[in-house]
Image (cartoon, helix red, strand yellow):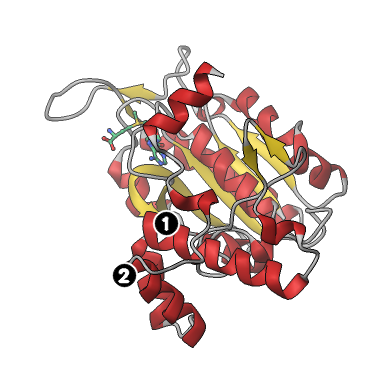
Amino acid sequence: MRFDVVTLFPEMFAAVSEHGITRRARELGLWTMATWSPRDFTSDRHRTVDDRPFGGGPGMVLMAEPLAAAVSAAGAAQRWAGHATGTVVALSASGRRLTDARVRQWAKECGALTLVCGRYEGIDQRFLDALVDEEVSIGDFVLSGGEIAAMAVIDAVVRQLPGALKIESSAEESFATGLLDAPHFTRPERWRERPVPAALLSGHHAQIDRWRREQALAKTARERPDLIASARAAGRLDERDEKFLRDCAQGTGGTVPPALGNPSSAAAKTADNAA
Ligand SMILES: C[S@@+](CC[C@H](N)C(=O)[O-])C[C@H]1O[C@@H](n2cnc3c(N)ncnc32)[C@H](O)[C@@H]1O
C-alpha cells in the first residue's frame, strides 16, 4: 500500500516510518510513503501557503492552490508507480469520525491513499470541495495540525495489512468483534495484592474464552453501550451473551470479575499510589 501525505511537516512522519510495527511492515515492503510539502508548489519568493480568512476572524487558512498542486503531484506519482489514483482524505476535526470498519476497508481496497494535513484554522473550503473525497476526524477534540491524525490513520491501516503483525491478533482486538477488547494480564501472578483472575490460570481454553467474552461484554456495556446496541442489531450476541448482560444490569452477574469490578475506584488508586 502507498501513502502520499501532503504536509508542511514531513519530518514528523518518521514516527511511523521509523518505529515499531509500522517500521517493520515498511521494511517488509508492505507499505511505502511519500510526503509532499505545499511550499514546494508555491510561486512567490516567500513560498506562501496561507492567508487571512475572508470575512475576518482569527488565524490563517491554508490556500487552495498549493494544496491542489501537491495532491495532483501525489496522484501522478501514484499512477507512475502503477496504482490507481488514491482516495484523497483530508484530516479535519469536523470530518466524519474514523471507524475500525473504514480503516479495514482502506487496508483491503485502497492501493494508495492521499492524506492532506491541515494547519492553522484549516483549509480553504474550495479545495476540500474540489479535490477531497472524504474528511476524516480521529475524535471529538482539536489538534494543532493534521499530521498526528494522519499518522494515526497510517498506523491503524498498516496493522491491518496482511503480514504486518507477527501474530495475526487484529481479529480479536477492540471493535473487530463488535466489542471492546478484554483486559490483559502478564507476570507476576500477583502484583500489589492484585491477583491475576483465576480463569486465566485455569489452562482450560473454553473457560478462558468465555471469561474473555464476558469481560469484553461487561466493559463494552459500561464504556460504550452504543456498541452493544450495534452488536445486538447485527446479530452478534447470542443467548448466553444476552443473559450475561441482563445479569450484569440487574447486579446479579456473579461472573462479573473483580478485574472490572470498579477499576477506577478512587480509594483503590490512592492506595496504589501510596504503595
Ligand atoms: C487547529 S486545527 C483547525 C480546527 C478548525 N478550525 C476547527 O475548529 O475544526 C488545524 C488542523 O488540525 C487537524 N485536526 C485538528 N483536529 C483534528 C481531528 N480531531 N481529527 C483530524 N484532524 C484534526 C486538521 O487538519 C485541521 O485543519
Q: Quadrant of ligand 1?
A: top left
Q: Residue at x 43, y 80 (%)?
A: 243
The percent position of residue 249, horizontal first and vertical second, equals 33, 68
Return the disc, 2 or 1, that comes first in the chain's sequence: 1
Q: In this orientation, which residue lies closer to the viewer: 238 or 261? A: 261
Classify 60 as above or below 161: above
The crowding category of the residue bearing disc 1, from other C-alpha atoms within 10 Å (few below 14, some 14 to 19, many at least 20), is some
Q: What residue type is labelled 1?
A: Glu
Quarter holding the C terminus is top right
Q: Name the residue under label 2.
A: 250
Classify 149 as above or below 60: below
Tell me the tag on residue 191.
Answer: none
Tell me the tag on residue 134.
Answer: 1
Q: Does 43 sit left or right of 31 as displayed?
A: left
What is the secondary structure assignment of the residue under circle 1? strand
Q: Does 5 sit left or right of 91 as displayed?
A: right
Per the model, the C-alpha gap separating discs 2 and 1 is 43 Å
Q: In this orientation, which residue lies closer to the viewer: 170 or 86? A: 170
Q: Does 127 sit left or right of 54 as displayed?
A: right
Q: Which amino acid does label 2 sit on?
A: Gln
The quarter of the picture where residue 17 lies is top right
Q: In this orientation, which residue lies closer to the viewer: 89 or 167? A: 167
Instruction: Mark 2 vs mark 1: give the one in front.
Output: 2
